[in-house]
Image (cartoon, coloured by chain):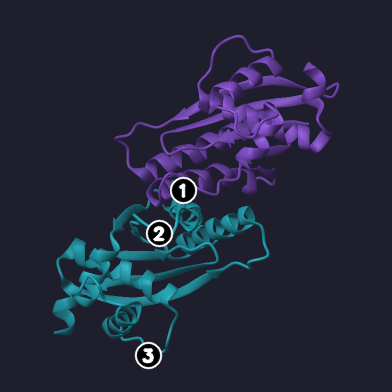
Chain colours: A cyan, B purple
Amino acid sequence: MKVLGIDPGSLVTGYGIIFSEDQTPHYLTHGLIKMRANVSLSDRLGKVFEGVVRIIDEYQPDILAIEKVFFAKNPHSALMLGQARGVALLPGVLKNVRICEYTPLEVKQSIVGYGRATKQQVKEMVMRLLSIREDMTYDASDALAVGICCLQHLQGGLSKRGIT
Amino acid sequence: MKVLGIDPGSLVTGYGIIFSEDQTPHYLTHGLIKMRANVSLSDRLGKVFEGVVRIIDEYQPDILAIEKVFFAKNPHSALMLGQARGVALLPGVLKNVRICEYTPLEVKQSIVGYGRATKQQVKEMVMRLLSIREDMTYDASDALAVGICCLQHLQGGLSKRGIT
C-alpha cells in the first residue's frame, strides 16, 4: 500500500510518499513544489496540478491523503488555500487514486497522540517513525504526517505499535 | 474574440460564452455544471474540471474570464469556493487560454454602471445587452456578466455604447 501525502499551499506544496510493509510505514521520498510569488496565481495553480500529476505518474500511489481544512486565518487565506487544495487533489480524482481526508486533529493525534501538538512535534515524530535523519521543512513533514495517519487509519495503529 | 465567463461554486458552476462582433458582445451559449450535494467534494471538483475542459474543447474560447474573489461569508465557504474556483480556471491554464480576472465591483460597474448593483439588476442588464429573452439563473447571468466585463475592458466600453 503506497500513500501520497500532500500538504497544499499557494506558494509551497509539500508531498511525501510512504508505503507499508510488515505493518510498519516506510519512507520512500518527499519533496516540495515551489512557486515564485511573482508568478500569477493561475500559473501557480497550474504548476501545483502538473507537479502532482508527475508525482502520481512516477510513484503510482494507491491513495492520496490530504488534510481536511475547516478554517483558516481569514477568508482571503482560506480562498488561496482552497484553490491550491482543489488543484492538488484533482490529479488523484482524475487518475482514480483513492482520496482520503483527515482533520488536522486526526493527523496530530495519530502521529503524536495529542491533538494540539506543534508542527515541530509532528515533524520530530514523523522523522522518528520513518527513520529520517535529514531535517525537512514543515511542508514536507506535514505531508508525510497525513500519509502516516492514513496508513494508521487503514491498518489500525501500526505506527504506534512500531515505535513503542 | 470569444470569451468564456465562469462563475464557480461548490454545487453549481455557471458558464457563458460570448463573442464580439462590430464592437458589440453577442451571445453564444450558457449553461450550468451541476453537482449533487451527496457526492464527495473531490468528485464534485473533478466534475467541474472535466466540465470546463469539455466547454473549452467545444467552443475554443480565446479568454477565460472569472471573478477575483477577496472575501466570503466565512473561512469555510471561502475554502469551498476557492477549491471550485481553482479547478474551474485550471483547464484554461493547462490549455493556454488567457485568464482574465475582474473584481465583483468591476463586473457590476461594467454591466450596470453601479458597483453595488444586485444580482437581479446584473441579470436584467446581461439579458438586455445580449438580447436574451429566456430567464436564467444568477449562476449563468453572473458568468455571462464577467465575460461581458472582460470584452468591455479589452475593447473599451463597447457594450455601453451598444445600448445607449
- Which residue is under mark 2? A72
Residue at x-position 80% and y-position 37%: B154
In the displayed structure, would residue B98 be above or below residue A104?
above
- Which residue is under mark 3? A133
In this view, which residue lies farthest toward the bottom?
A133
Identify residue type, mark 3. Answer: Arg
Element type at mark 3: loop
The tag on residue B83 is: 1
Q: Are marks 1 and 3 on the same chain?
A: no
Residue at x-position 26% and y-position 81%: A129
Is residue B60 visible from the viewing direction of this image?
no
In this view, which residue lies farthest toward the right?
B22
Identify residue type, mark 1. Answer: Gln
Q: Nearer the viewer, mark 1 or mark 2?
A: 2
Q: Chain of mark 1?
A: B
Quadrant of the rendering where the N terminus of chain A is positioned? bottom left
Please indicate whether residue B1 sits to the left or right of residue B15 in the image: right
Quadrant of the rendering where the C terminus of chain A is positioned? bottom left
Q: Are marks 1 and 2 on the same chain?
A: no
Element type at mark 1: helix
Contact between marks 1 and 2 (CB within 8 A): the answer is: no
